[in-house]
Every structure is written in C-alpha cells, then in structure tokens.
Amino acid sequence: MPFTSLISVQDLHANLQNPDWVIVDCRFSLANPNLGEILYRHGHLLNARYAHLDKDLSAQITDFTGRHPLPDVRVLVEKLGAWGISNHTQVIVYDDACGAMAARLWWLLRWLGHEKVAVLDGGIVHWQKTYSLTTALPKIKPVTFRPYLNDALRLDARQVENALAQKSICLVDARTPERYRGEVEPIDPVAGHIPYAKNRPFQTNLTIDGLFLSPEKLRAEFIALAGETAVENVVHYCGSGVTACHNVLAMEYAGLKGSKLYAGSWSEWIRNKNRCVSKA
C-alpha cells in the first residue's frame, strides 16, 4: 500500500534500498536561503536528492505574486524527472522543521496528480535519533514524469475574495497568532490577516516532540475549526503558501480529504491595496 500522507522513520528505513522509492531533502531557512543546501552537503539520508524552496519549488517573484509563487509546471516536471521521479515512484520528503518545508513538495506533487508521496514524520531530527546520515551524493537515472494537473486543489486571490463574499469557505491562516493578529510582522510589509480567516498555526498539528498528533485528535480539532463548512470548502493560507501545506497535510492525515490551498497567501494578498486586511 502506498504512503500518501506521513511515513515513520522505521517504515522509511525498512524501504531505504527500494529502487522504486525516491527521497527528497527539503531543508530550507527563510533567514538563510543557502543553509538547507549546505546542511544537505554535510549529511543527508541515503540517496536523498535536494530540493531548494526558492530555486526548485517556486517560480520567480513578480510585482503581482507572493514570496513563493507556484513553480511553472513544465519546469517542475522536468526537475522531477531529473530527480528520478516517475509516475510510479513512491516519493518521501523530509526537512528539519517538522514538515513545514517538506509539505510544500508533498502538495506540489499532489497538484500534479501524484498521490504516492509522504512526509517523514519528525523529519531528519527523528531519523538521526536512530539512524545515520551520509555525505555521498546519489546516482540518479533520469526518467519521465507525466503531470495530471489538478487545479481543483487550489484557489487564487479572486476566488478567495468571491468565496469570502459568498461566505462559502472557511479560510484558515497557518501563521503564528501574533502575526495573524497583526501585532508583529517580521517578513511582509503589511501586518494582519485576511478578513474572516481563522487562525490555526501549523505548529498546533504537532506534539512537543515534533511528531504529528494522532489522526483522531487532528480530525476533532479541524472539524471544530471548520464548523458546518464542508471539508472541500476549507481553504488554507500562510505567509507565502508554504507552511499552509502543513495544515492541508494534517487534514489529509486525519482523513479529512479535499481541503484547498490559497497558494499566493498573505504576501500576495497585500500586493493589491484594494484588498481588505484585518487585525486582532
């Protein structure tokens, strides 16, 4: 049975030499964009490739986009093939941030129609508690990846505006409470949140040990958050469309399938001064 949401370090270790599996290291620091690749060179899981958030998993920023626009599909598809990922590959993604970065590639693959992708629960931190790393670079045989784009998994800014006006969605903000309330804003030029959005920091999905909460607990919490809104009308956003994927993943892991992503997120929303913002 394929892994489609999370995988434990034990299950990954048991399949570490499986030729049909590909592991991708997604470590990244917003404060130091080169740090993830440096850490990868100093030690990573066996045969892991490295995916850079800015260079590989995002398009170039324009005057109209957020900080991490969705990548061009053709460019991303070429990179997946170059990493040895085909439509039959079981993909495992990990980071050192409890899945906050790895969930981006998890979501992108699902957007391209690839269901066999899972985030390593606990990431490299939990892996190193039991298993070792390597500095050897993987030998990769390029393959062909064919996308089956599922744009129903995302909303753009106009769709979010319309849905909020119609009160047809539950919009969920994955940022920290103080950023949501507009008390601080360390990254973007405008503080606050999208009107009517509810706050669910992605860290709320985790135990104090950095592992995901049980599916049962996550399910109960997200159902309470959404209220009477159907799962497919729950829409997630964050600062730039990265950590919001963590909430999408948590819902999927909890059996609540079909929630959406507003990929442009806050950093795109505030590009248009005609869009309303809220604080507190």
Image: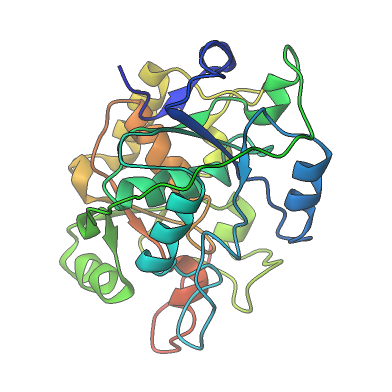
141, 253: nearer the viewer: 141
Q: In the rendered view, tell whether residue 12 sits above or below residue 98.
A: above
* Image-based side of 146 in relation to 122, left or right: left
**Residue 146 coordinates in the image, percent (x, y):** 28, 52
**Residue 203, position in %: x, y?**
58, 38
Query: x%, y% of residue 23?
Result: 55, 34
Question: Would residue 80 be visible to someone looking at this image?
Answer: yes
Q: Residue 11: x percent and y percent? A: 51, 13
Query: Quick one: 123 or 117, which is closer to the camera?
Result: 117
Q: Residue at x 25, y 35 (%)?
A: 257
Above or below residue 132? Residue 151 is below
Residue at 39 percent across and 89 percent down: it is: 274
Left or right position of 129 against 193: right
User: Measuring 55% from the left and 25% from the top, which residue is drawn there?
Assistant: 121
- Tell me which corner region of the image, top left, top right, bottom left or bottom right, holds residue 220: top left
Side of 39 relative to 20 (left or right)? right
Q: Disc count in the image?
A: 0
